[in-house]
Amino acid sequence: MFSRLFKLVFLLTLTGCVSTPYDEPISNNVATIKFSNQGRGDAEIFIYKDAQFCTGKQNAGKVDRLSYKELTLLGGEKQSFTFGYGFDDYNGGKSCSITATFTPKINGVYEVLMVSSYKGCVAYLYEFNNGKKISIEGEQRDYSSPVASDDWCE
């Protein structure tokens, strides 16, 4: 019972109260991103319409544990996303999610790799360039007060 309640609370926290389905852009100015889940549970992906304040949350789907999902994003513009998962262990239910912002290049190919760590989870952002996988920097975001404000991250 507690496990189910925890998962519900985790999903509400991760999704906020409202999200809409993610609409992949129909444009020539896109980038491809692969969300790879090496975490301890099935993950959810959310893409935000407003990258600056993480508003307009869109549900981009589920990524099974030890699997991945590819999406297209608008290239040349800041993009913000949340990637996270919940799981049960001997201490009860746990969750981990990371919200980040980066600017993908038009026609760029990227990967976000989520892995479990001793203290929770870590996400790595990579760009594929001439067949090489190169670590790049994104901006990890923190949640502000979504109840008191319309802005979700700072």
Image (cartoon, helix red, strand yellow):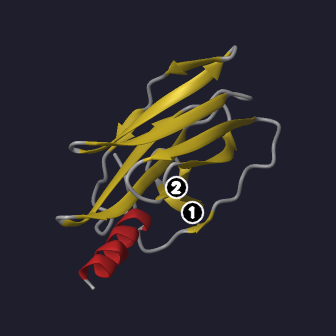
Q: Is residue 151 visible?
A: no
Quarter of the image containing the N terminus? bottom left
Gap in angstroms between the C-alphas marked 1 and 2: 6 Å
Q: Is residue 80 left or right of residue 131?
A: left
Q: Amino acid at mark 2?
A: Ile
Going 31% across and 53% down the picture, which residue do you hit? 143
Q: Which mark is residue 70?
A: none
Q: Is residue 44 left or right of residue 98?
A: right
Going 51% across and 49% down the picture, which residue do you hit? 66
Quarter of the image containing the C terminus? top left
Q: Which residue is more in the foreground, 53 or 20?
A: 20
Kindly identify which residue carries mark 1: 59
Q: Which residue is more in the foreground, 17 or 3?
A: 3
Residue density around tag 1, few if under 14, some if 14–19, many if 20 or more, within 10 Å: many
Question: Where residue 107 sits: x, y (%)?
Answer: 74, 29
Q: In the figure, 116 relative to 14: above or below?
A: above
User: Residue most toward the front?
Assistant: 90
Kindly identify which residue carries mark 2: 45
Q: Secondary structure at mark 2?
A: strand
Question: Where residue 53 sits: x, y (%)?
Answer: 43, 50
Residue density around tag 2, few if under 14, some if 14–19, many if 20 or more, within 10 Å: many
Q: Which residue is more in the foreground, 149 or 83?
A: 83
Q: Is residue 37 left or right of residue 147?
A: right
Q: Which residue is more in the foreground, 151 or 133?
A: 133
- Residues at circles 1 and 2 in contact by the CB criterion of under 8 Å: yes
Disc on the earlier residue, 1 or 2: 2
Q: Quadrant of residue 32?
A: top right
Q: Is residue 72 visible?
A: yes
Question: Where residue 25 sits: x, y (%)?
Answer: 74, 49
Q: Amino acid at mark 1?
A: Asn
Q: Is residue 153 left or right of residue 33?
A: left
Q: Quadrant of residue 20?
A: bottom right
